[in-house]
Amino acid sequence: MPELSKIETYLVDLNLKYREIAPNGWLINDDSRGLEETLVMFVAPLVIVRVKIMDLPTSRREEFYEQLLRYNVVDLVHGAYGIDGSDVILIDTLEYDSLKKEELEASLDAVALALNRHYPVLSKYRDK
């Protein structure tokens, strides 16, 4: 499938440690880049970058939601925090047709930066 080769070529060019987990999906596990369990998927016409941050906490939710919203507004370069079922995720979407390697790299770097900066605060809300 030609749609997938461009994404995988970019992952290789960026020297990322990843594995193909489906014909349209790759899982990045690259500690040196600050990316763990980061999923890159091609779902026409989008490239989706997604990582689970943690389970949704059962207590102090209002305070937790407020923190997520604040990060979305003032401290994320790419993407947004969201909730999928009981998972707190960070997700970014890119347009496949105009996708450049530098754009994918910027998205992945922004995800790694957010994980590094935000997880120490967000993890305090985890259920014990």
Image (cartoon, rainbow, N blue to C red):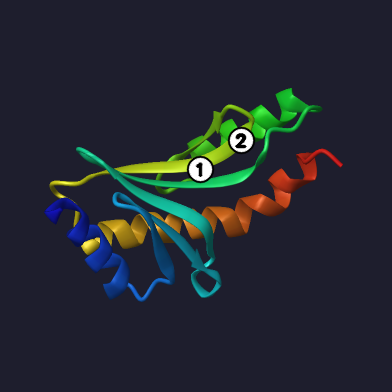
- In the picture of the structure, the residue carrying the numbered disc 2 is 87
Q: Horizontal placement of 34 versus 64: left or right?
A: left
Give SS at disc 2: strand
User: Residue at the right extreme?
Assistant: 128
Asked if residue 76 is positioned above or below residue 73 in the image, the reply reads below
Asked if residue 38 is positioned above or below residue 55 in the image, the reply reads below
Question: Which of the two discs, 1 and 2, sits closer to the camera?
Answer: 2
Give the image location of residue 27, x and y in percent: 44, 58
Give the image location of residue 97, x and y in percent: 13, 46
- In the picture of the structure, the residue carrying the numbered disc 1 is 90
Using the numbered discs, state the Cα–Cα distance from disc 1 to disc 2 in whole angstroms. Answer: 10 Å
The C terminus, quarter of image: top right
Say which of 17 and 99 sits in front. Answer: 17
Name the disc covering residue 18, or none. Answer: none
Q: Which amino acid does label 2 sit on?
A: Asp
Q: What residue type is labelled 1?
A: Leu
Seen at 35% across and 59% down, the residue is 106
Give SS at disc 1: strand
